[in-house]
Image (cartoon, rainbow, N blue to C red):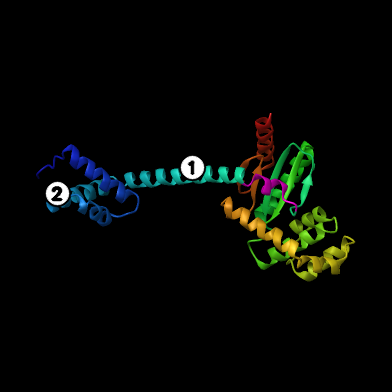
């Protein structure tokens, strides 16, 4: 069998072809991209293609490794973009007038949480969050209603914000995170009455322009930060997607405080 010895130029062409294949473009598409190179004859192109096909058959891990490297670069790029978005939208994240605030209003570290009342992970992380905030004593929490999972989520978000207009946001929020029943208007009405709230006013405020505007603003913020699920946290100036443990929350609070010092 005749051995193909490639010159430096041919090796460069082969590398270009390999990278194209490795990143999902396909050998045919990569070969077509070489058509504009007048120095490459059809025969050479076919021979290079044959070498690459044979190499990939014998070394499929090359493609896997190239794809993984590409994914890592994509993740790094997205993380950098999210960090920049946090800085660009920091005031809207931490100081928006319509967003309920818990913990210590004068805390030196702020945690922002995007959540959904029908999100199981949000429900599981809530005790860890509240315990961490309470034990620290110097953490401010901003709650971003982000109802993305179901119509019930939207009813819950509107009801909690409406309860906040009567000074009972945290009580209502905690109750909705714990409730097992479907979140319907009748359920939130009963919950409001059990807390001594004006249930008729709550139902009216649920439809108010202010409540609508707050939820819309949260959707827009999540889009800018590329938040695609719940829960998602901004602790200090670090975006943390997904549920996290009490130890992780405390660690991130400490890191945020150290950066400020």
Q: Give the Cα separation between the discs numbered 1 and 2.
A: 38 Å
Q: Is residue 132 left or right of residue 234?
A: right
Q: Where is residue 208, by image quadrant?
A: bottom right
* Quadrant of the frame with the N terminus: top left
- Residue 36 place in picture, x, y as percent: 21, 52
Q: Local crowd at mark 2 within 10 Å, few (<14), some, or many (≥20)?
A: few
Helix, strand, or loop for circle 2? helix
- Residue 180 place in picture, x, y as percent: 74, 62
- Residue 134 place in picture, x, y as percent: 79, 41
| Residue at left offset 33%, top offset 47% | 63
In the image, residue 72 sits, relative to residue 157, either above or below, namely above
Helix, strand, or loop for circle 1? helix
What residue is disc 2 on?
A: 44
Q: Is residue 93 magenta?
A: yes
Q: Is residue 46 left or right of residue 27?
A: left
- Any mark on residue 111, and which? none
Question: Which residues are drawn in magenta?
Answer: 89-97
Label 1 with label 2: CB-CB less than 8 Å? no
What residue is disc 1 on?
A: 76
Q: Is residue 83 left or right of residue 132?
A: left
Q: Which residue of the protein is positioned furthest toward the top in this rendering?
A: 261
- Residue 55 place in picture, x, y as percent: 24, 46
Q: Where is residue 3, by image quadrant?
A: top left
| Residue at left offset 12%, top offset 52% | 43
Frontmost residue, 106 versus 102: 106
Closer to the N terminus: mark 1 or mark 2? Answer: 2
* Quadrant of the frame with the C terminus: top right
Q: Is residue 45 magenta?
A: no
């Amino acid at each position: 069998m005749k051995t193909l010895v490639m010159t430096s130029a041919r090796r460069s062409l082969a590398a270009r072809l390999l990278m194209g294949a490795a990143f999902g473009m396909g050998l045919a598409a990569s070969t077509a991209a070489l058509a504009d190179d007048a120095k490459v004859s059809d025969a050479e192109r076919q021979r290079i293609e044959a070498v690459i096909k044979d190499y990939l058959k014998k070394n499929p891990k090359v493609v896997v490794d190239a794809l993984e490297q590409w994914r890592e670069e994509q993740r790094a790029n997205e993380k950098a973009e999210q960090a920049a978005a946090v800085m660009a939208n920091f005031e809207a994240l931490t100081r928006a007038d319509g967003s309920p605030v818990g913990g210590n209003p004068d805390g030196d570290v702020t945690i922002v949480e995007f959540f959904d009342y029908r999100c199981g992970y949000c429900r599981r992380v809530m005790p860890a969050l509240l315990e961490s905030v309470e034990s620290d004593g110097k953490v401010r929490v901003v709650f971003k209603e982000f109802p993305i999972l179901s119509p019930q989520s939207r009813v819950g978000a509107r009801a909690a914000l409406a309860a906040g207009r009567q000074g009972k946001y945290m009580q209502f929020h905690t109750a909705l995170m714990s409730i097992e029943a479907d979140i319907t208007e009748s359920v939130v009405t009963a919950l409001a009455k059990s807390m001594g709230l004006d249930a008729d006013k709550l139902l009216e405020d649920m439809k108010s322009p202010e409540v609508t505007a707050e939820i819309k603003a949260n959707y827009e913020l999540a889009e800018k930060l590329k938040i695609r699920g719940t829960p998602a946290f901004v602790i200090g100036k670090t975006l943390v997607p997904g549920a996290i443990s009490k130890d992780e929350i405390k660690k991130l609070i400490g890191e945020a405080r150290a950066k400020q010092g």
